[in-house]
Amino acid sequence: MIIVLSKNITDEQKQRLIHRIEKLGLTPHISEGVERTIIGVVGDERILQGKPIDGMPGIEKIINVLKPYKLVSREFKNENTVVKIGNKAIGDGDFSIIAGPCSIESHEQMLSTANFLKENKISFLRGGAFKPRTSPYSFQGLGKEGLEYIKDAGRKNDLAVITEVVDARDIELSYEYVDVFQVGARNMANFSLLTELGKQDKPVLLKRGMSSTIIEWIMAAEYIMLKGNSNIILCERGIRTFEDYTRNTLDLSAVVAAKNLSHLPVLVDPSHGTGRKEMILPMCLAAKVIGADGVMVEVHPEPDKALSDSKQSLNFEEAKKIFNKIRKLKWED
Ligand code: PEP
Ligand code: MN
């Protein structure tokens, strides 16, 4: 249930309403918008039957949400969420670019990548320290050592740092090194991880699971938001289909759906979404046209030597061309 408060509600009326909701054993989530304040009521709404609160003063209207997701829905908050990351933001109307290697491999690799990104006015550096690989024999990431490299490279070049956590135990270890926690496709439905991230005061980039429906993806965001963290960025990274020409099938229609269903910013990852370098530019341009809030692409100083995702990683020259072309495309809907 969503309660829209009237513009002239007094503080006392608001407090009384919140108290009443809590006394009924339900949890109020308050969203103070520019235009109006909204209370999302979470819990077993059947409790409210026969105990009407719509007669209480200060309520403009009550909307019953039948959808399984509430806090991330457009009904709960009509304005787009802008995720603030230090002095940077995602979802503020600018098309964001996140770039960096698949895996953090060395200090030099991260420093040269970060330096290249700064020169090209990119604000966000990615790189994995814990790599959830399909094979247990593949490179698994540098762990804490890698976190130190990415943090240092980010700090020296004024870049916000995004890195994946694969287990709830990684959160504490990673906390001081990262600006945004990434949840990878393989962990989208790791509900204990999502719940822990919901208690953090840093944003979460939530990738869509490779076999997840759009609604399952939105529900995963609801898990995070229910625990109090509303700084969530969704990221479409392709799903598994029968098609094997591309690594995955990049589902751009899911971006449109997610933007319509939720107020969260939505990014596109064409590197994992297609696995093919020649498709990265066209998919980035398409992402901009359909209203995505940005893209995440894999860039490596020497892609041939990359320890993971070598084939889909762009070198600096290729990346620079793509960044310029993305910026040149002016699109307003
Ligand atoms: C990644 O971004 O490095 C990654 C592992 O992606 P995904 O979880 O989408 O496979
Ligand atoms: Mn990768």
Image: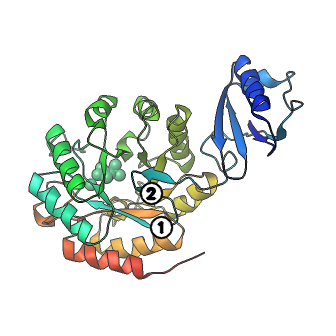
Task: Name the secondary structure under disc 2.
Answer: strand
- The quadrant holding residue 319 is bottom left
CB under 8 Å between discs 1 and 2: yes
Q: Residue furthest right?
A: 55
Mark earlier in primary sequence (1, 2) = 2
Residue 94 is tagged as: 1
**Residue at the image position 38 percent from the left and 47 percent from the top:** 185
Q: Is residue 327 left or right of residue 81?
A: left
Disc 1 to disc 2, C-alpha distance? 9 Å
Q: Is residue 100 left or right of residue 214?
A: left
Residue 84 is tagged as: none
Residue 183 in sight here: no
- The quadrant holding residue 143 is top left
Q: Quadrant of ligand 2?
A: bottom left
Residue 57 in sight here: yes
Kindly identify the amino acid type of the residue bearing the numbered disc 1: Asp
Quadrant that contains the C terminus: bottom right
